[in-house]
Amino acid sequence: MIKQAPSDIGLHELLQKRWSIRSFDQRNLSFQDIEKLFQAAAWSSSSMNEQPWRFVYAERGKGHYDDILSVLMPGNALWACNAPLLIAVFAKKYFSDGTTNLHAWHDVGAACMSLLLQGVSLGIYGHQMGGFDREKAKLVFGNSDDYDIVSIMALGYPGEADALEEPFKTRETTPRVRRTPELFAFTSFEQL
Ligand SMILES: Cc1cc2nc3c(=O)[nH]c(=O)nc-3n(C[C@H](O)[C@H](O)[C@H](O)COP(=O)(O)O)c2cc1C
């Protein structure tokens, strides 16, 4: 199923269609499409063009899939285990000259959104997750202090909500809601 944002507000179709699915079709992603997802991330903007995003990806049944899955909180792992692609997302904390990159997470988030929107254009949907065991992830991924673990993404073609157990089935069909711009876009700093 596809849960679109309202169509009467003039959003681009990709923005309208993107949402965080939990039910995945069993179809695998092609190598070419996986490549396109990462090309989309590559062409995101970043502070000093540092491109601090790093991704470790695994297709279901291959590579580090089970390692990535193993660090997710149970409430995520229960549905993410059906995704054909899992991606662990990292931010390189330092610029090439060794100084701290204060915008690393910002730029990684932007790259993730590019990746997700490219996915939507291909019929592939993703779900970003901050619900993972950070300490366990550090051990399982063996990652150095130069990189923060930002998130984990599950991606694939959308499946049927009926394939999910509760409470995920209900969440899958609950309408998406948003704050309206007047609640977060201001013309003075006092309004913050
Ligand atoms: C950094 C980040 C962490 C998130 N963590 C989780 C998570 O652990 N579990 C989950 O089900 N959804 C998670 N989400 C998905 C959000 O709940 C979802 O994006 C939000 O409810 C808006 O829904 P939409 O993406 O369908 O528009 C996360 C999203 C982001 C960007």
Image (tube, rainbow, N blue to C red):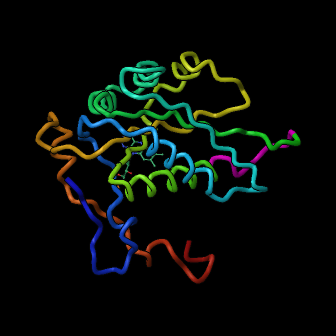
Question: Where 190 falls versus 31 (above or below)?
Answer: below
Front in this rendered view, residue 19 or 184: 19
Residue sitting at x 39%, y 66%: 15
- Left or right, 112 with reference to 157: right
Counting from the top left corner in percent of width and height, residue 14 is at 39, 65
Q: Main secondary structure of the magenta part?
A: loop
Q: Quadrant of residue 141?
A: top right
What residue is rendered at 11% in x and 41% in y? Answer: 162
* Left or right of residue 51, residue 164 in this image: left
Q: In the rendered structure, does residue 104 fall within the stretch colored magenta?
A: yes
Task: Classify 9 as above or below 99.
Answer: below
Quadrant housing residue 45: bottom right
Q: Residue at x 33, y 55 (%)?
A: 19
Residue 136 as seen in the image, left or right of residue 143: left
Relative to 26, is 28 on the left or the right? right
Taking depth in this image into account, of 127 and 135 the one nearest to the observer is: 127
The magenta span reads 98-105
- Classify the position of the C terminus by image quarter: bottom right
Residue at 24% of width from left, 34% of height from top? 26
Q: Position of residue 81 (x, y in %)?
A: 31, 27
Residue 107 is situated, as x and y percent measured from the top left of the image, at: 64, 52
Question: For this rendering, which residue is in front, 67 or 28?
Answer: 28
